[in-house]
Each structure stands twice: as structure tokens, then as C-alpha cells.
Amino acid sequence: NSAQTCYEYTFGEAAIQADFLTPSGTDSYSMCEDIPIVVLIKNVKNVTVTDLMLEWNLPLNGASIVPGSFEASYPNAGDLSLPFYSIANPAISGNNLRYDEDAIFSNAIHTNGFPGILAPNDSNQLVIRFYIETTCDVFVSGSTARFEATANDPCSPIPLESGEVVSE
């Protein structure tokens, strides 16, 4: 007898998943300090997807993006101690950040696609990290960020979406 866990997808087939990560040991941050925004993106479909796009909506009332702080780690299943490499800033419009082109954050994903769940060495997972700087006495504690990833499935005309993920 072995214990098994089964999952039922009630909103369609699994595809792209995303989640905000919190660096170990950092449950809270002081006002007036930089706050890391870290997202894990995972392809849980059994196919290599293309044209991976990433989009954040941030609480910028009392916070600003730290230019040049954008980094990626690929492949990476959420281990923040692994090496990160600098990437160009995304397109920024107010509180919206967007990477419309995956070549900006990963030449490997742009060239080879974003592998599916059966790929070895966590190559179906990517971490993006950057910082926001809070403004003393203006930033609203408890503000949340939102993120969504989309990609194209070569077997379907319908784009894959992570759905909007909200930070805690």
C-alpha cells in the first residue's frame, strides 16, 4: 500500500504556472528599504512552448522600481541561492512591467523554446528577480503585486496563460 496524491484540474489542462517566492528568512521588510520581487515560472505542459511573455502590475504608490536590478536564473526550480544573471529592464509603463520578447531575459528559451514538464534539470522552470524601493511614509504596507505569464503552444492556436497570480 502506497499513498498517492491526485490533482484534478477544474479549469482546463495545466499549462503555465507562476508563483511569487519569498526569500528565506524574510517575512517582513522595513520601510525605506529595497524589497525583492521574485517570480517562479513553470511550464507544466508536456510540450515545448514559445514566445514566453511576462507581465507584472505593481503597487507603485510609495514605491519605485530599482533600475538595473532585473535578474534571471534559468534553469531554476525556485532555489534563490543558485546563480542569477543580469537582464535588461522590461518595458515600463506606470505600474505595469512587461517582457514581450523572451530573448530579453533568456537566449536559451528564445532559441530552443521553454521545455515542458518532462525536461531534465529543471529546464521547464525560470526565476525572475528585481527590486522595488519604498518611499518612507508613503508606501502602503500590505500592497500586493500581480503577475501573469503567457506562451504559445505549437499544438494549439489558443495562447497558454498562468492566470493572474497575486503576491502575499
Image (spheres, grey):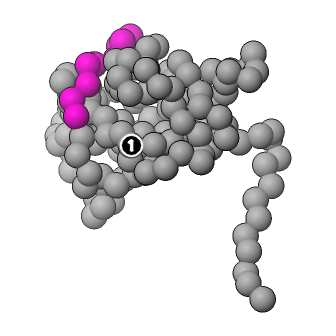
- Residue 93 percent across, percent down from the top left: 38, 10
**Residue ID at (51%, 26%):** 113
| Left or right position of 3 against 162 | right
Does residue 53 appear in the picture of this structure?
yes
Q: Is residue 10 left or right of residue 107?
A: right
**122 up-or-down from 105: above or below:** below
Give 75 or 119, whichever is nearer the viewer. 119
Residue nearer the viewer, 28 or 112? 112
Name the residue located 51 percent from the left edge and 42 percent from the top edge: 124
* In magenta segment, residue 23: no
Residue 96 visible, this orientation: no
Asked whether, in this view, residue 60 is left or right of residue 157, the answer is left
Residue under label 1, please give it. 75
Report which quarter residue 148 is drawn in: top right
Q: Position of residue 167 (x, y in %)?
A: 47, 43
- Crowding at dot 1, Cα within 10 Å, few <14 / some 14-19 / many 20+, comes out as many
- Say if the magenta span includes residue 87: yes
| Quadrant placement of the N terminus | bottom right
Q: Residue at x 59, y 27 (%)?
A: 49
Identify the element where label 1 is drawn: loop
Residue under the image location 26 percent in, 29 percent down:
70
Horizontal and vertical percent position of residue 119 = 53, 45
First to last magenta residue range = 85-95
Q: The disc labelled 1 sits on which kind of residue?
A: Pro
What is the number of callouts on the image?
A: 1
Q: Which residue occupies the extreme bottom position in the image?
A: 1
